[in-house]
């Protein structure tokens, strides 16, 4: 495999952003087309990578020849590779990235700057998923935070809270999370270097060395990491940035943030924290499970009380991430499979939801549910997209999110028994708030003031087509997703299981 | 201690420098007029230069480090005064004062 | 050809699914073409289903050994030793073959009927696409070889039900009814899902055949207590889907949907899915006597409860809806006394006569421009003879008048319940309840028929008979309502030789019971005739309503159960949502903002030190240096030392 597929996937949006700098700022069409082409290349290539990945071999692939020692003295290597866990995330990023360009197709306010930042954001998120070096991972993660802040405070919208507050809350929360993370990573690095004597920041190297750490070290290091990744994945009670942040952010940022950025938390939790510190993970698993379950129930009720569509979806994403946390806490093959699959499923669904709400807002200039109604008559295609996302959100079988949830329930019920039932009961409340929002927005008597609205058409249909297709195909053929994830989870589980058994924890 | 009066030792230079520095510091801290403050800063720089030259002469007579340093200081001081005075003139044109008590816009 | 159909039964659900896709993506702009695609695919599907059913019913081997073919759907764990494997597949045995035939046949009839009923409605194509999707999901449910697949189809039919109830999206009532249906079923599905999860965890498989073997020896895997819990959890699902008490509330409201939908989904097919599920998992319930008793009691109670509400309702479709709930209770009762045969038999006959009655009611609504109150009708049989007489046939069938279909199946259930009484006295009570229900059923059905079709014509009604594509299904189904019971007569019970659980149970005909149940039905009709037909002023009816005003109000308001749920939903659920939300924005956010506030406050405090006066800064700077110098002078290496001792 000599074609440098991963670097090109990563570079395509960056190159597009660089080209955009030299495009005259009034050429709106051209700007959008360039951004679309950049993300399209990434999307197609990552689709290709997804299907070219050899699941029977597993492990890290597409990496040959792209490992470049970056800071040799610290053991930092610019090492891009994917395995069965990161590849779905990469694909998800690009699907959502491509769709998000079209969800912002009607952006008239400084589009050039907007799309440059958006492309940087997409590239940054991708980087976190394909870097297999902790240092580079953190670097990409920090790259991501900056454009988000700028985009929220310039292109965001003020509702319950001002956009400045929302942007600030989002950014500071994430930075505090990453501060914990940074502390944990540095400590972990120092300790592993002390153990092995060889500076090495690569995931594999750190994980191999960290497994020799004392139980106590594992426990407190994991706690720090769980705090960092937990606040990123909006673990209860560190979730409050999520609804406000999504509500304040422009559509594309909400899509990417809820769709993939949040998943960096779950991804890091599995690929870094659990893999490196299995004993710590085992120690904290019950706490994480309880917080996850609390998040599911709490956020579901929170969503029920909302009247602003974006807040509904914001709380719902907190609720869904609770399932991911429960699944991670199960620490078994089924649970980890479910966690990754649910992140993928939720990403697709949340992105579709936010893009549809974005169009709705663009057309009606409101997101306040009582001000809407009967829109299914005036904007039928929009309604289809909305309902698909809504149905996926409530875990309708046949759409991508049901099987991951089922898998998580199997594992959670097995590991936590009665406690898991509270989490599973979340599906009732979810149905309640999702259907309420859908019914009050789309159905009922049409309002005359919206009679002039145009349905989504042309480029605006892209998010619906791309994400809707994934939603349905993933639901009908779950093995497409699960075989891939399983090929990444099995070796990972083998390693942590090994350590746990050595440590006498099983 | 006859040489105290007849020969000039390092101690004399150091004391002189300390006195000059003290005068300069006092002026820089208490004077209200910005130009005076600038002048006082110059006095402090002079004190420093005396130190440099004296130590050079008595401790490492074969090197010229101190002298070279002093020349640097003079150059930088000249530049600094030039910039400083330019700023002061600009301020004076705007505010019609160079009283430091009135120039507290850096507050908050 | 039969062989082909038998081994490719997956075509049966696939064809309507394809029709759905074709209509959505291709033929949506052309309504007639769309309906042709839907009807055509369903007819073709019915053809295949008939062939496959023929294949099943000509080989008695399948009665005990279902024909199963499945493929891996997804799995996880090591390739050699997976921890979780889920398959999708087809399971053909007499029960599923019967259901498959019934569903495709009734669907074809109702699709055809819909081409007339929905003519000219906005969203005609969309309606047929939904119907096709429903057909596909329902057939998938029927043919499922494992419980997860069944659950998926179960939810999908729920979705179609939601979409079709709310088909007239501009009507608030339709919207609310659709939502209510979905959420009520969701509550029940939660229980079912837990049950399925427990089965997966305890027995490690969800395939029906494997489960039935493992549960037969359940002591190897689990205890009786756990199994009872599982059985109860699984039964919660059917309570919701088949409208059993206390989750029946959605079914009458579901009548907001177009009438063909009510006939297809809320009478003949989807609502019996719960009964079918319990029938499919009989191997689980028979092991747990407590669960069986619960099913029987739930069924009998629901039957009587719903029938009592139906006595006083006024809207034609609502009466039919409560009648459906009541009949579903009958089927549950049959399952509860351990007779898969009787339950499936009643399911089968009920599908014909209830679909018939709904379609006839739809025809009435069509003719009267959606005037639904039976008290506003009258004498319709003169203007709508086909509709009227087919409705009468349906009424006779449901009232249990021999030799129509309903008589045989109802008789079978009564007989089984009576015989179960030899085990425990409680079944005698259930038998009595069932008999009372039979009387009430005959009464309220004929009350409706006499009010709507006989008596004086109302001058402001201008009814007209419906077009051929609506009356043809009526005639076909009416024929069915007469004849489909004949395969299960007590003298030669062909039905029981095919559809049974574990082993066929032959019961001798009980003539006393047969005569008795026919008399009960006849008495109900006679009473209805006396009150609503013979006496044009309906004086007796009004007098009774006046005398028992309390009971009448209670029944008319459906025992106020909807109100209780509404109160619960608005007060408890929304209230706690409100509490959670307030907690979130005041407490959780308060803490978060508190951190921000603390930072800001400390900044405020510290900024008094920034005077803006350079000289202050310089002074502090100097003092700092001085402090360091002093410190060094006393603690650090001496200046003399630093200078190398030259002085």
Image (cartoon, grey):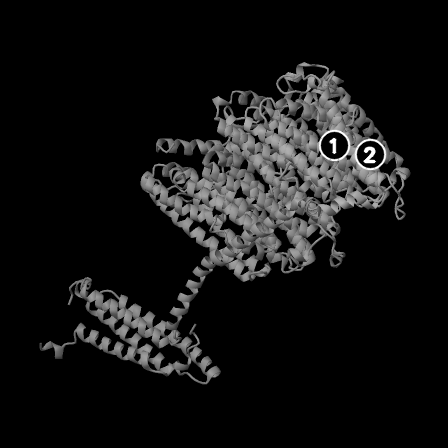
What separation in Å lies between label 2 and label 1 (alpha carbons)?
A: 29 Å
Residue A1, visible in the rendered structure:
no
User: Residue, x 77% and y 24% (percent of image)?
Assistant: C484
Chain assignment, label 2: C
Could you tell me which quadrant the N terminus of chain B lies in?
bottom left
Residue annotated with mark 1: C16
Left or right position of C504 against C352: left
Of A462 and A27, nearer the camera is A462
Q: Position of residue A222 (x, y in %)?
A: 39, 43
Callout 1 secondary element: helix
Instruction: Tell me which label, 2 or 1, sits earlier in the chain.
Output: 1
What label sits on residue C601 in the rendered view?
A: none
Occupied quadrant, residue C520: top right
Of B84 and A427, nearer the camera is A427
Within-10-Å neighbours for mark 1: few <14, some 14–19, many 20+: many
Chain assignment, label 1: C
Q: Position of residue C545 (x, y in %)?
A: 74, 45
Of C421 and A30, nearer the camera is C421
Within-10-Å neighbours for mark 2: few <14, some 14–19, many 20+: many
Left or right position of C618 against C567: left
What label sits on residue C391 in the rendered view?
A: 2
Q: Is residue A139 above or below residue A411?
A: below
């Amino acid at each position: 495999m000599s074609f440098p597929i991963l670097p090109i996937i990563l570079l395509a949006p960056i190159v597009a952003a660089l080209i955009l700098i030299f495009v005259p700022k009034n050429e709106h069409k051209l700007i959008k087309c360039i951004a679309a082409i950049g993300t399209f290349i990434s999307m197609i290539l990552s689709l290709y990578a997804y299907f070219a990945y050899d699941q029977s071999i597993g492990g890290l692939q597409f990496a040959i020849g792209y490992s470049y020692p970056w800071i040799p003295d610290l053991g930092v290597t610019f090492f891009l590779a994917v395995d069965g866990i990161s590849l779905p995330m990469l694909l998800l990023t690009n699907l959502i990235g491509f769709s998000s360009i079209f969800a912002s197709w009607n952006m008239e306010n400084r589009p050039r700057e907007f799309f440059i930042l958006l492309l940087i954001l997409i590239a940054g998120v991708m980087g976190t998923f394909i870097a297999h070096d902790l240092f580079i991972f953190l670097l990409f993660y920090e790259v991501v935070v900056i454009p988000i802040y700028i985009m929220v405070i310039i292109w965001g919208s003020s509702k319950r809270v001002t956009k400045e507050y929302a942007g600030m809350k989002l950014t500071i929360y994430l930075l505090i999370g990453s501060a914990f993370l940074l502390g944990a990573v540095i400590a972990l690095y120092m300790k592993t270097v002390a153990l092995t004597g060889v500076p090495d920041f690569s995931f594999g190297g750190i994980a191999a060395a960290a497994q020799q750490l004392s139980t106590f070290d594992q426990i407190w290091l994991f706690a720090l990491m769980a705090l960092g990744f937990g606040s990123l994945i909006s673990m209860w009670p560190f979730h409050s940035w999520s609804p406000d942040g999504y509500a304040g952010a422009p559509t594309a940022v909400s899509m990417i943030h809820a769709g993939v950025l949040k998943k960096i938390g779950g991804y890091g939790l599995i690929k870094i924290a659990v893999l490196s510190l299995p004993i710590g993970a085992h120690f904290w698993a019950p706490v994480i499970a309880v917080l996850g379950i609390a998040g599911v129930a709490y956020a579901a009720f929170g969503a029920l009380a909302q009247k602003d569509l974006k807040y509904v979806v914001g709380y719902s994403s907190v609720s869904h991430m609770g399932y991911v946390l429960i699944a991670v806490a199960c620490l078994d093959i089924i649970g980890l499979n479910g966690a990754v699959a649910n992140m993928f499923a939720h990403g697709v669904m949340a992105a579709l939801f936010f893009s549809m709400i974005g169009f709705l807002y663009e057309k009606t200039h409101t997101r306040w549910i009582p001000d809407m109604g009967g829109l299914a008559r005036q904007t039928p295609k929009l309604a289809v997209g909305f309902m698909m996302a809504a149905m996926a959100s409530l875990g309708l079988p046949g759409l991508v999110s049901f099987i991951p949830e089922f898998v998580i329930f199997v594992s959670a019920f097995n590991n936590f028994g009665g406690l898991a039932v509270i989490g599973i009961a979340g599906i009732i409340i979810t149905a309640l708030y999702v259907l309420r929002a859908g019914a009050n927005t789309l159905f009922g008597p049409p309002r005359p003031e919206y009679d002039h609205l145009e349905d989504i058409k042309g480029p605006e249909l892209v998010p619906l087509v791309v994400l809707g297709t994934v939603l349905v195909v993933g639901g009908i053929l779950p093995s497409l997703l699960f075989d891939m994830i399983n090929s990444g989870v099995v070796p990972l589980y083998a390693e942590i299981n090994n350590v746990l058994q050595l440590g006498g924890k099983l | 201690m006859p040489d105290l009066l007849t020969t000039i030792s390092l101690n004399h230079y150091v004391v002189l420098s300390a006195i000059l520095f003290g005068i300069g510091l006092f002026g820089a801290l208490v004077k209200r007029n910005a130009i005076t403050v600038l002048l006082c800063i110059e006095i402090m720089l002079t004190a420093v230069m005396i130190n440099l030259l004296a130590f050079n002469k008595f401790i490492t007579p074969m090197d010229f480090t101190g002298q070279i340093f002093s020349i640097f200081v003079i150059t930088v001081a000249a530049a600094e005064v030039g910039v400083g005075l330019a700023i002061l003139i600009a301020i004076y044109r705007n505010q019609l004062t160079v009283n430091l008590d009135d120039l507290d816009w850096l507050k908050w | 050809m039969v062989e082909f159909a038998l081994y490719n039964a997956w075509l049966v659900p696939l064809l309507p699914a394809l029709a759905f896709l074709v209509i959505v993506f291709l033929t949506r702009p052309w309504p007639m073409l769309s309906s042709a695609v839907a009807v055509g695919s369903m007819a073709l599907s019915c053809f295949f289903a008939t062939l496959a059913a023929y294949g099943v019913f000509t080989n008695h081997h399948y009665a005990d050994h279902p024909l199963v073919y499945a493929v891996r759907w997804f799995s996880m764990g090591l390739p050699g030793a997976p921890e979780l494997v889920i398959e999708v597949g087809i399971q053909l045995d007499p029960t599923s073959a019967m259901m498959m035939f019934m569903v495709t046949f009734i669907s074809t009839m109702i699709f055809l009927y819909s081409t007339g009923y929905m003519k000219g409605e906005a969203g005609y194509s969309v309606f047929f696409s939904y119907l096709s999707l429903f057909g596909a999901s329902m057939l998938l449910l029927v043919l499922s070889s494992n419980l997860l697949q069944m659950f998926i189809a179960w939810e999908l039919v729920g979705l179609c039900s939601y979409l079709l109830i709310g088909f007239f999206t501009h009507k608030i009532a339709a919207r609310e009814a659709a939502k209510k249906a979905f959420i009520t079923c969701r509550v029940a599905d939660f229980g079912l899902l837990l049950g399925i999860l427990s089965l997966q965890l305890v027995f490690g498989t969800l395939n029906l055949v494997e489960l039935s073997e493992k549960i037969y020896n359940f002591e190897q895997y689990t205890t009786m207590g756990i199994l009872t819990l599982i059985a109860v959890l699984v039964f919660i699902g059917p309570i919701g889907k088949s409208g059993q008490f206390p989750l029946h509330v959605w079914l009458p409201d579901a009548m907001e949907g177009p009438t063909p939908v009510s006939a297809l989904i809320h009478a003949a097919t989807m609502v019996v899915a719960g009964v079918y599920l319990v029938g499919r998992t009989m191997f689980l319930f028979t092991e747990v006597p407590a669960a069986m008793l619960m099913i029987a009691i739930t069924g009998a109670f629901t039957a009587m409860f719903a029938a009592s509400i139906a006595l006083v309702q006024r809207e034609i479709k609502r009466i039919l809806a409560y009648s459906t709930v009541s009949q579903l209770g009958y089927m549950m009762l049959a399952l509860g006394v351990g007779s898969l045969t009787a339950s499936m038999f009643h399911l089968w006959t009920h599908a014909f006569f209830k679909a018939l009655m709904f379609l006839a009611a739809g025809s009435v609504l069509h003719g009267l421009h959606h005037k639904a109150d039976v008290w506003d009708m009258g004498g319709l049989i003169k203007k709508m003879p086909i509709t009227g007489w087919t409705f009468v046939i349906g009424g006779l069938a449901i009232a249990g008048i021999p030799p129509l279909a309903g008589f045989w199946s109802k008789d079978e259930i009564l007989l089984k319940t009576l015989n179960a009484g030899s085990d425990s006295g409680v079944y005698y009570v259930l038998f009595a309840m069932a008999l009372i229900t039979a009387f009430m059923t005959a009464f309220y059905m004929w009350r409706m028929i006499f009010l709507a079709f006989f008596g004086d014509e109302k001058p402001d009604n201008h009814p007209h008979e419906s077009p051929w594509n609506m009356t043809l299904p009526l005639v076909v189904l009416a024929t069915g309502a007469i004849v489909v019971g004949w395969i299960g007569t007590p003298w030669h019970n062909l039905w029981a030789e095919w559809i049974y659980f574990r082993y066929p149970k032959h019961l001798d005909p009980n003539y006393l019971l047969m005569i008795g149940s026919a008399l009960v039905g006849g008495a109900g009709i006679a009473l209805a005739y006396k009150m609503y037909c013979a006496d044009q002023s309906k004086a007796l009816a009004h007098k009774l309503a006046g005398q028992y005003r309390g009971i009448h109000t209670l029944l008319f308001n459906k025992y106020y159960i909807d109100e209780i749920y509404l109160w619960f939903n608005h007060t408890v659920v929304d209230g706690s949502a409100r509490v959670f939300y307030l907690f979130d924005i005041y407490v959780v956010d308060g803490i978060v903002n508190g951190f921000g506030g603390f930072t800001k406050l400390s900044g405020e405090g510290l900024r008094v030190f920034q005077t803006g006066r350079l000289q202050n800064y310089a002074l502090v700077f100097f003092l700092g240096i001085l402090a360091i110098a002093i410190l060094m002078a006393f603690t650090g290496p001496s200046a003399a030392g630093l200078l190398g001792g030259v002085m």
